[in-house]
Image (cartoon, rainbow, N blue to C red):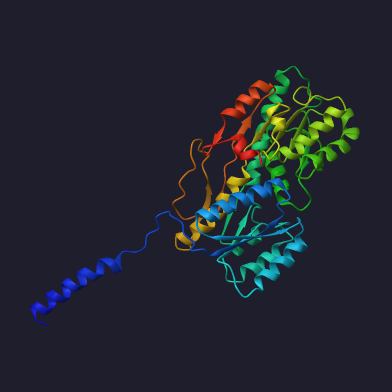
Amino acid sequence: MNKRRFLALAMSLAAVLPVAAVAQEPDGKLDGGGKEIVVLMPSRSNAYLAQWIRGAEKSATEANYKLTVIENNFDQTEQDAQTQQRISAANQPAAYVWWPADNQAGLATLRRLSRTGVPVFQVNQALRPEAKDMVVAYAGVDDFFNGQVGGKNALAAREAFVAAGNTLSSEGGNLVILKFIPGYSAGDDRERGFLDATKDAPFNVIASEYAGFDNASGYKAMSQLIPSIRGKGIDFVYGGSDGPVTGAIQALEEVGLKPGKDVFLVSATCIADISAAETAKEFATGVQSAGLEGWFSINVVARYFEYGETVTDGTYIAPDDAEARPDFNFAPSKYNVIPNPQVVVGTDPTGAKEALGTFKLWGETFADHCVY
């Protein structure tokens, strides 16, 4: 090759190579091109799940994905059938999002999902050890951690209870635990987290009862418990969320007890009705935002595709920044967890309103996160 032709070829390559050699680096601007994400989950008849869906829809819109939600009535058999029908369809989505009705009983169906070749993400219910390799990543709450926040709330409540001049009914104080429903692992994880956080200064657990998710079920459970345990003395009530705690307050008041005065109640997380916290009948809670969780879960899926279909090993806990939503301009981790800040409102309604009024998480108020 003569010198002139070599120089011409070199100049030609110099003009072409920069364009070809520059990779499409992710810029944090998510664009799924309208691809479908299918969510398999329990029903939005539950207020928390309805708000989760709204947050997920917002996240999908921001990232340009089509979101399809297939709901079951907290029934694993129904969810199994729905899932089989969807994976048998000719057109498969870009990703499946799995929120099991029963975390353990749903493992067989999760295994079938994992064999479709479509990436599967689990949300809200913590991964069972045997499910680790069935999903690309987990996104949502850490219920064991939430239970630990509930334990911290109870320890603070006990200190305030004694400081107010009340006498504990037993060493450590008598405690009632109100769980969710049988088979729903979040309730079991929250109970374990609570007991872990209080193990060095334990309470005397006089009852542990399934109490559902809402006020009505909490009221029913507490009403049934009171006749058999009142004689022992009821000092504290811990609920998986504000829902059963708010119902328990009504049941306690109907028999002449005074929540926030002679019985202190706490929960792990807020949900829908915050009247108990606003009136200081509930001493403390945590801010697990349903809308924030839904948004974050779908954002994890979108970032998986944006950053080369890879995940980072380990656990990422999203910060509880007060003023603005953090920038999530990086690949997701294997485990991605939302924050659950502790909120102690005390026993004075005026102070409670001030504590709730000044709270901020990702630029939004306590009511923004907890009322829906």
Residue at horizontal 64 percent and vertical 22 percent from the top: 351
Image x and y of residue 25, in percent: 37, 59
Total tally of numbered discs in the picture: 0
- Residue 13 image-quadrant placement: bottom left
Identity of the residue furthest to the bottom in this view: 1
* 360 left or right, relative to 245: left
- Residue 344 image-quadrant placement: top right
Residue at horizontal 71 percent and vertical 40 percent from the top: 241
Image x and y of residue 296, in percent: 55, 50
Quadrant that contains the C terminus:
top right
- Residue 307 image-quadrant placement: bottom left
Residue 127 seen in render:
yes
Residue at horizontal 81 percent and vertical 32 percent from the top: 250
Image x and y of residue 349, in percent: 68, 23
Image x and y of residue 323, in percent: 49, 36
Residue 172 seen in render:
no
Residue at horizontal 73 percent and vertical 23 percent from the top: 161
Nearer to the camera, 28 or 154? 28
